[in-house]
Amino acid sequence: MTTRYIAVAITKGGTGKTTTVCNLGHGLARRGRRVLLVDCDTQAHVSTYWNITPKRGHTLAEVLTGTRPATRCIVSVRPDLDMLASDRASLAGAKLAMAQDPTGQRAYWLRDRLAEIGGYDDILLDTAPSWDVLSMAALLACDDVLIPISTEYLTLASAADYVKAIDDVKQHNARLRVRWILPTFLDGRSRRSGDVLAVLRKTFGALVVDPVRVNTDLSTAASYHQSIFEYAPTSRGAEDYGALVERVTQ
């Protein structure tokens, strides 16, 4: 089995990264793919989304620092959907250890630990909205990048800068490529939202996938610790993330 590593990433908050990781992950699992979610943000939002409090000493932090193998830290979320959970304190400590690593290999810790895990079709990494050591490590571990971009003007500059930065990272990971750009929070009533979508399509062309529209069911589903496919399977949110699952599996 060849595992595909996907970073869901951009250096801007509020674009729907965690919502995308959780719903795309469950959508892929519902298609029969074996999926692992990796919570690479000290805010631990993926863990919060699924209402998972990891057992002490069994988090991504211990995997990163090599004190416990990943196979002992993986927890089940749904059928065919697992995760490496995090908590704020332990992951912050692991990031500090990475920053102080005298060998110069800290950026590859995550890649090397994930390479030890077998049996998954897709590994999705939720990253922090910053260029911290763990976000860089996630990009060095991955093949593909999915960039969620909220349809507002301030995000356009962040998106363009991030795509350019990915080119720099390719010097250290030749496999890495921006594979999908996902417009999020599209408001059909707003001309400005539509204008931003048009700019994204003009700028990034075929990389831009069908948008995720504004849908309160998505945030409500998270509050119930469910994917949109569980909470509101006939909603616009389920339709939009279903379309993303189709695109990613092509």
Image: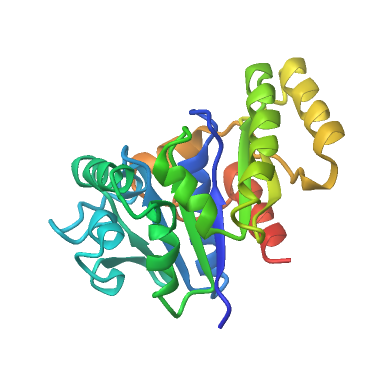
Q: Residue furthest front?
A: 102
Query: In front: 220, or 200?
Result: 200
170 or 33: nearer the eye? 170
Q: Position of residue 21 (x, y in %)?
A: 49, 50
Determine whether, in the image, residue 167 is placed left or right of residue 84. right
Numbered disc total: 0
60 on left or right of 193: left
- Which residue is pictured at 80% across the width and 21% down the height? 195
Residue 29 percent location from the top left of the image? 50, 68
Measuring 81% from the left and 26% from the top, which residue is drawn there?
199
Residue 47 versus residue 92: which sits nearer the camera? 92
Task: Return the residue nearer the eye: 17 or 144.
Answer: 144
- Tell me if residue 247 can be seen: yes
Q: Quadrant of the N terminus?
A: bottom right
Q: Is residue 215 left or right of residue 128?
A: right
Residue 205 against residue 137 in the figure, above or below = above
Work out which residue is located at the far left of the displayed protein and give it. 56
Q: For the C terminus, which image quadrant?
A: bottom right
Q: Quadrant of residue 62?
A: bottom left
Q: Position of residue 68 (x, y in %)?
A: 21, 68
Q: Is residue 22 visible?
A: no
Image point (64%, 39%), residue name: 212
Name the image colouring.
Answer: rainbow
Q: Is residue 63 above or below residue 22?
A: below
Going by the picture, which residue comes out furthest to the bottom?
1
The residue shown at (61%, 60%) is 143
Horizontal and vertical percent position of residue 19: 48, 43
Find residue 194 and report its image quarter.
top right
80 horizontally vs 248: left or right: left
